Amino acid sequence: MKTLRSYIRGDWHEAKSGLAPLVNPSTEETIAQAGSAGIDFAAVLDYARQKGGPALRAMTFAQRAAILKEMSKVLRDHRDELLALSALNTGTTTADGSFDVDGGSGTLAYYFALGKGLGDRTFLAEGEGVQLAKTEGFYGRHILVPRHGVAVHINAFNFPVWGFAEKAACALLAGTPVITKPATSTSMVTERAIELIVAAGFLPEGALQLVVGATGNLLDLLGAQDVLAFTGSADTARGLRSRANLLAANTRVNVEADSLNAAVLAPDVQDGSATFNLFLKDVKREMTQKSGQKCTAVRRILIPRDRMDAVQEALIARLSEVVVGDPQDPSVKMGPLATAQQLDDTVRGIGELKQAARIVHGTGQRTDGAGAPAGKGFFLQPTLLRSDDARNAGPVNEREVFAPVATLLPYDGSARDAAEIVALGGGTLVTSAYTDDAGWAGDFVARGGGETGRIYIGSESSAGDAPGSGAALPQTLHGGPGRAGGGEELGGLVGVKLYLQRVAVQGAKSLVDGLVG
Ligand code: NAP
């Protein structure tokens, strides 16, 4: 059986003990094993600090950007192979796998273009300068310089390529060497992607290392100049960000975590209109894409109270079209959940939601999948629940069920009621609102903006272009307040700044301008 390897200190390391099995989620066959036993994490950090950091910092933004261009090309050139591995290891259909793989290459390509535009500089000037005294004898400007540390990236199981690539793009562009750790259960795809990138031979020594399996004492060794960027569950995030050494050193920690994202149908949207159809199409996609295992998936659907029955019926008609099964079967539109643990957690989570809601579509239990052996595979039909009291729906506003599961909730049609119910989620990555009423949209943004990282407005005018609320595009922010982790990724330079130190440079204007350029 294949044992996945870590890429550390310029070489491939295969653990000999402590190996965890990786499973095909459609058949439950073991396909590989992975672990990190035997890795000297202090040496891994030293290698990044002594080789990767200096090499990257000596390069200009344009030169670092060129690395991202090559990484993007490798992922594009091997797209089919990575999609096949994704189907095997994570159970994705081709469309769902491409959301991850093409999302990764696209994000790297975006940051290549951004970095190329920053040109032959090794640091950035930020904003205008300001005179600090009566004359130009004392003046100040802000600059952003690479920190002298290492970026440790810990990713969730659901995006083995995009998750690694979107974080690495920002860190490498900033000049920070990366140690990346995918979730063990789906690390087969990340391992192969990095194997291909390393084999292409363009990475500076020490710029990128891969840890497959547990991180050992790696996090204990992080200090003031390092960055820990984590994506995963809020529980894991809490444990990681409260580590004593990270608190003592004020190590930068960025967290992308759970999110009870909501889609809101505004009262102006008539049945059968372009905006209504966009709403139905988006909600179906955002419930079922990647089998609902997306941090940006829709979990709560807010409907004007008097339209609940009609919208429920229309959504059920759409969800009934979804064929669940092994992605190798051409009829299949939605694959399994990625692991047995995800399925267990989902069934348990639906049980909790049922304390405040009732199932109106699906069973909330494992099902057999098309093209898969009977009794095998982590399959679940899309599951729609309904609660008729949104403000007292307890777990519906608090428990993220990471699966094709969402709950219909009524509201009174006002932007105020919608925003207050959305806020019960405790902070989200994205909120979508479907309306052609600019006044309603403005009111909703004003009342609900502080509770979410992104507001996606679906309307007749956007229906032809909008990619769905679940797409985290590199140009705009990905992250959200509160439960969503409080982090900020992507958003053009926003994501790069995590790895840069802002320095105020003060002195005579002529000197400061000369230094900053
Ligand atoms: P998870 O169990 O928290 O694991 C996430 C990552 O943390 C994995 O790589 C895991 O490694 C690692 N990890 C766990 N304990 C650790 C420790 N003590 N030290 C170091 N690393 C540790 O989450 P998951 O089940 O993979 O992902 C699902 C969750 O991620 C969902 O809640 C979802 O909302 C969230 N998510 C958020 C975003 C976002 O952008 N906001 C994106 C995707 C997913 P092992 O696999 O080796 O245990």
Image (spheres, rainbow, N blue to C red):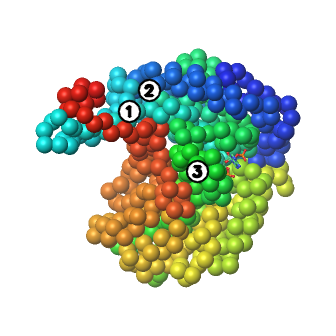
N-term-proximal mark, 2 vs 1: 2
N-term-proximal mark, 1 vs 3: 1
Q: Residue at x 25, y 39 (%)?
A: 140
Above or below residue 322? Residue 143 is above
- Let me know if residue 68 appears in the view: yes
N-term-proximal mark, 3 vs 2: 2
**Label 3, label 2: how far apart the Cα atoms are:** 32 Å
Q: Which residue is mark 2?
A: 65
Front label number (1 vs 3)? 3
Residue 148 or residue 192, whichever sits in front: 148
Q: Which residue is mark 3?
A: 247
- The answer to whether mark 2 and mark 1 are in CB contact below 8 A is yes
Q: Quadrant of the N terminus?
A: top right
Above or below residue 38? Residue 380 is below
Residue 483 or residue 52, whichever sits in front: 52
Q: Which residue is mark 1?
A: 114
Question: In x, y percent, where is residue 87?
Answer: 69, 41
Mark 2 belongs to which amino acid? Ala
Residue 22 or residue 387, whichever sits in front: 22
Q: Residue at x 59, y 58 (%)?
A: 258
- Let me know if residue 240 appears in the view: no
